[in-house]
């Protein structure tokens, strides 16, 4: 049995979001969850609600157990767990989860789901997929940027492929290149951009103000 762990204190807007995710389901991390064993094997981590947290320099969710929570959808706060390594969503009436729900979850190495659901990104996004009882476990997230053959992801010239979650990648402009398909080179024209944006915003505000004035005079 693991030793007693002190809860991690957190404050501010980030702490509020963290507490909302970790307390979405009542009770602590379930002992049967892969999140519990992951957290217990790493003394530097701490349990808080349904989360396993790293404590330095600020608490970060590295494990999330939302199993047996009667969830039909993941919820708006789910992206706050994007640094998670282990996630458990078993024993929930989840009918479908889009791949974009895990956008940014580049650290995720194990996720347990209801058996009826497929692994995020499909089987090609994982090294190993197993089923046991009513659950499905996806392990070892693959980096599709390093794939070859049909799985290879080609980015435009002057850009590089970067993982963006299970089955997802993004093309980031290299060096000083920017813009559509990274075709422009040099410093991004911030002054011109914000100047044009400010002018457009001011014009729209004046038009709206004038319209309201005309309506007020006709009343």
Image (tube, helix red, strand yellow):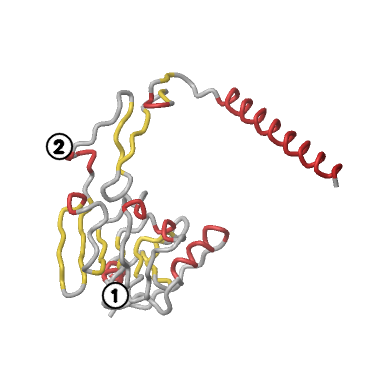
Query: What label does residue 185 carry, if any?
Result: none
**Near-viewer residue (1 or 47):** 47
- Residue 172 is situated, as x and y percent measured from the top left of the image, at 36, 33
Q: Quadrant of residue 176?
A: top left
Instruction: Write the residue at 31% across / 39% down.
Output: 162
In the picture of the structure, the residue carrying the numbered disc 2 is 148
Q: Secondary structure at mark 1?
A: loop
Q: Residue furthest front?
A: 218
Which image quadrant: the N terminus? bottom left
- Residue 124 is situated, as x and y percent measured from the top left of the image, at 18, 49
Q: Is residue 155 left or right of residue 25?
A: left
Circle 2 crowding by C-alpha within 10 Å: few under 14, some 14–19, many from 20? few
Q: Secondary structure at mark 2?
A: loop
Q: Is residue 45 left or right of residue 110?
A: right
In the picture of the structure, the residue carrying the numbered disc 1 is 91
Q: Is residue 150 left or right of residue 39?
A: left
Numbered marks: total: 2
Query: Which of label 2 and label 1 is nearer to you?
Result: 1
Instruction: Write the residue at 54% across / 63% down.
Output: 16
């Amino acid at each position: 049995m693991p030793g007693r762990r002190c809860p991690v204190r957190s404050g501010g807007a980030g702490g509020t979001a963290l507490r909302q995710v970790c307390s979405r389901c009542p009770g602590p991390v379930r002992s049967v969850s892969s999140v519990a064993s992951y957290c217990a094997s790493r003394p530097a981590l701490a349990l808080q609600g349904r989360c396993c947290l790293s404590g330095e320099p600020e608490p970060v969710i590295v494990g999330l157990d939302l199993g047996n929570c009667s969830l039909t959808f993941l919820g708006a706060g789910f992206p706050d767990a994007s640094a998670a390594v282990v996630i458990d969503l078993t024993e929930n009436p989840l009918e479908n989860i889009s791949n974009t729900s895990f956008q940014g979850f580049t650290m995720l190495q194990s996720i347990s789901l209801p058996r009826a659901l497929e692994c995020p990104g499909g089987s090609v996004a994982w090294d190993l997929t197993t089923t046991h009882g009513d659950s499905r476990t996806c392990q070892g997230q693959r980096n599709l940027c390093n794939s070859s053959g049909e799985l290879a992801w080609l980015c435009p010239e002057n850009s590089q492929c970067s993982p963006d979650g299970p089955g997802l990648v993004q093309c980031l402009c290299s060096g000083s290149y920017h813009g559509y398909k990274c075709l422009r080179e040099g410093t991004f024209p911030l002054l011109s951009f914000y100047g044009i944006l400010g002018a457009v915003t001011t014009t729209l505000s004046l038009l709206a103000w004038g319209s309201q004035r005309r309506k007020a005079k006709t009343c």
